[in-house]
Amino acid sequence: MTKGLLLLLLNIPIILFSQEIKIIDTKNTPIQYAHIMINNKIGVISSSNGIAYLNKKLLPTDTLIISCIGYYDTTLAYKNITKSGLVVLKPCTYMLDEAIVIGKKLNKNIKIIGNKKHNTKFLFDDGYEIAYFVKTEHPNSKIITVSYYITKTGIPSTPFGVRLYYLDTIVKKPGKLLLDTNIVIHANNGNSWVEYTFKQPIKAPNEGFFVAMEWLPTAKRYLKEELKKGEVMVASGQCLGGKYEKKSNEIVVGRWFPIREWEYTYSTIPSIQVKLKYYE
């Protein structure tokens, strides 16, 4: 009896604190890498199978805001989640600019814009996003591909998110989403470029746009080192290549989830390139 009671008591904390939810769509398909905000303070990202592990014991009145590119945001109280722990997101279509389709004759002019050098690297943990501003030099152009240089440091094959944003012309930072699809890619090997080709080329805004990379959840941390006494850095997943410049006119911003604000932080330019096609 005593042994059975002890086992029961040992299991209680697991029941109380092992809280998880699963994010699915209307076809019961798991939604990978959805963002879950708890009371607008704590951020969690769902795994590749749609499961999100909640780090704190939630009260029935706690509010969850769940979002993912390509789906409507869902806000609900924790008490309204069923015992199954399932949360269903409804798919949506973003109202992108009418100029997405250009019906003019293709000029065979293709230009690659961005930074191809990589003498340093970016090391971050889950939930970080870095964005690089790309100038649109021709008014009639489409985004054909985006490419990221992934170094051999860490775990190169870790998935990461591809993001495109309009330029917020007031604050000169990323604005609303330009890309309405949740795209996740990965490298096969380190020290190589990873290229994604859009099935339907995207109209490049005349004022320019941001290309971003988001670090997604991984069970493996590859780096833990003391930068200076009392300050330890932990990184996970892959490393994005970069080029250090003491003085640069390039716009590079970053942010941590769940913090929504973008900050200018870098003199290092990420190794990100965009292939554009120009039309007459």
Image (cartoon, rainbow, N blue to C red):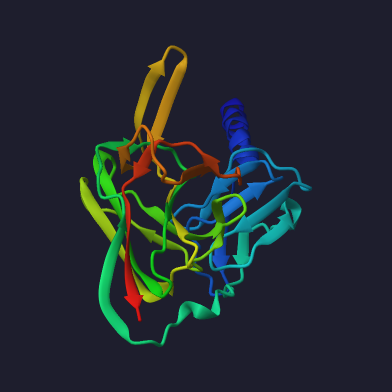
Would residue 261 be visible to someone looking at this image? yes
- Going by the picture, which residue comes out furthest to the right? 61
Q: Is residue 12 above or below residue 108?
A: above
Q: How far across and down, in percent of the image, does residue 50 sit?
A: 50, 58
Q: Position of residue 93 (x, y in %)?
A: 57, 75
Residue closest to the eye, 276 or 50: 276
Please state which of residues 109 and 230 is positioned toward the viewer in this rendering.
109
In the rendered image, which quarter is residue 95 located in? Answer: bottom right
Q: State how many labels appear.
A: 0
The answer to which image quadrant residue 169 occupies is bottom right
The quadrant of the picture occupied by the C terminus is bottom left
Q: Nearer the viewer, residue 15 or 161?
A: 161
Q: Residue at x 41, y 29 (%)?
A: 234
User: Going 70% across and 42% down the picture, which residue do you hit?
Assistant: 58
Asked whether the viewer can see residue 237, the reply is no
Quadrant (top left/top right/bottom left/bottom right) for the N terminus: top right
How far from the left and from the top, in percent, is residue 203?
Answer: 44, 73
Give percent across and percent down for residue 238: 32, 43
Q: Residue at x 61, y 71 (%)?
A: 90
Q: Nearer the viewer, residue 179 or 185?
A: 179
Question: In screen coordinates, is 20 left or right of 60?
Answer: left
Please say if 198 is above or below 120.
Answer: below
Residue at x 37%, y 26% (from the top left corner): 224
Residue pushed farthest top? 229
Q: Image quarter for residue 19?
A: top right
Horizontally, residue 249 falls left or right of residue 76, namely left
